[in-house]
Structure formats: C-alpha cells, structure tokens
Image: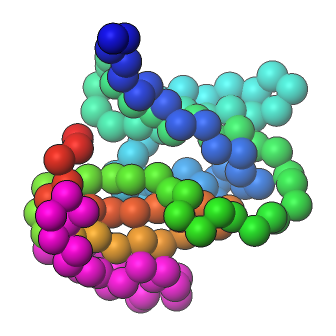
Amino acid sequence: MLRMKCTHVALQVRSIERSVAFYERYCGMRIIHDRTDDFRVVWIGWGAPPHRFALVLLENDYEQNTQPELQHLGFAVERREEIDEIAARATADGLTVDWPPTDAGGVVGYFCGLRDPDGNLVEFSHGQPLG
C-alpha cells in the first residue's frame, strides 16, 4: 500500500488579496511563496519551513458556478471553544455561517462552516481523528 501525505490543495480564486486575507484571519495561515508567471500563484501555510501543507491559490477570474453541496476544506482546531469564536467572528464580519456550530459526536465532532470569498466551503472542526 502506498503511503501518501496531502501536501496541498489548489484553489482557483478571483482575488488573491481577498483570499489571503480570509485564510490569514480565519485559519492563521501566512504567505510562504508568491510568484507571477502567466498569472499570480500564492502558497499559504503555517509555521516555519519545511512546510507540510499549503493551500495553493491560483488567481484567475472565472464565472461563479454552483459549488457541490458538501465539497469543502477541513481545518482542525485545538479547542472546542475556537469553533464558537470563529463562528462569532464571521457573524460580526457580516459573513453567513453555512454550518452553525454543531456537535455531531463520534468521528465528526464539533464543527462549523463558512465560505471563503470565492464560495468555497471551509469547515472548522474539533474532535475529529485527523490532523
């Protein structure tokens, strides 16, 4: 059996600045690589090199399509209270919390979900056996 690690998720975004601001504010990520060839590409992640995971943001204006209902990015937090703090911060910023804080128990744990500036659903969870 192959042993793999998820190293990145690439997202096409309409505005690098708006997307970076979202992931900095809500996920604590920082820019770790920034380049422009035919279009701008920014990697954002956590901590010092070597980075184990990055979101790769590819700037490209596109038509907003309906997103698949359960397609999302998952971020684990250390404390259950952080879920409530993230949902409260999003509400204060005028964002819709698509999945209000919910305790689903078992493998799902406590979670909430909101959308980034391009409509991608982002889940914040505590108690899942990941991360």
Question: Residue 94, position in %: x, y?
Answer: 52, 87
51 sits left or right of 68 in the view:
left
Kindly indicate the quadrant of the structure image that contains residue 10: top right
Q: At 42% from the left edge and 71% from the top edge, which residue is drawn?
A: 113
Question: Residue 16, position in %: x, y?
Answer: 67, 49
Vertical relation: 129 (above or below) 52: below
Which one is in front, 89 or 128? 128
Kindly indicate the quadrant of the structure image that contains residue 91: bottom left
Q: At 29% from the left edge and 25% from the top edge, which residue is drawn?
A: 48
Residue 92 is covered by the magenta coloring: yes
- Report the number of numbered marks: 0
73 sits left or right of 46 in the view:
right
User: Which quadrant of the figure contains the C terminus?
Assistant: top left
Kindly indicate the quadrant of the structure image that contains residue 26: bottom left
Q: Would you say residue 42 is visible in this rendering?
A: yes
Question: Residue 62, position in %: x, y?
Answer: 86, 54
Q: Which residues are magenta?
A: 81-109
Q: How is the image coloured?
A: rainbow
User: Which quadrant of the figure contains the N terminus?
Assistant: top left
Q: At 71% from the left edge and 45% from the top edge, which residue is drawn?
A: 12
Residue 1 is covered by the magenta coloring: no
Vertical relation: 83 (above or below) 18: below
Vertical relation: 44 (above or below) 100: above
Q: Would you say residue 126 is visible in this rendering?
A: no
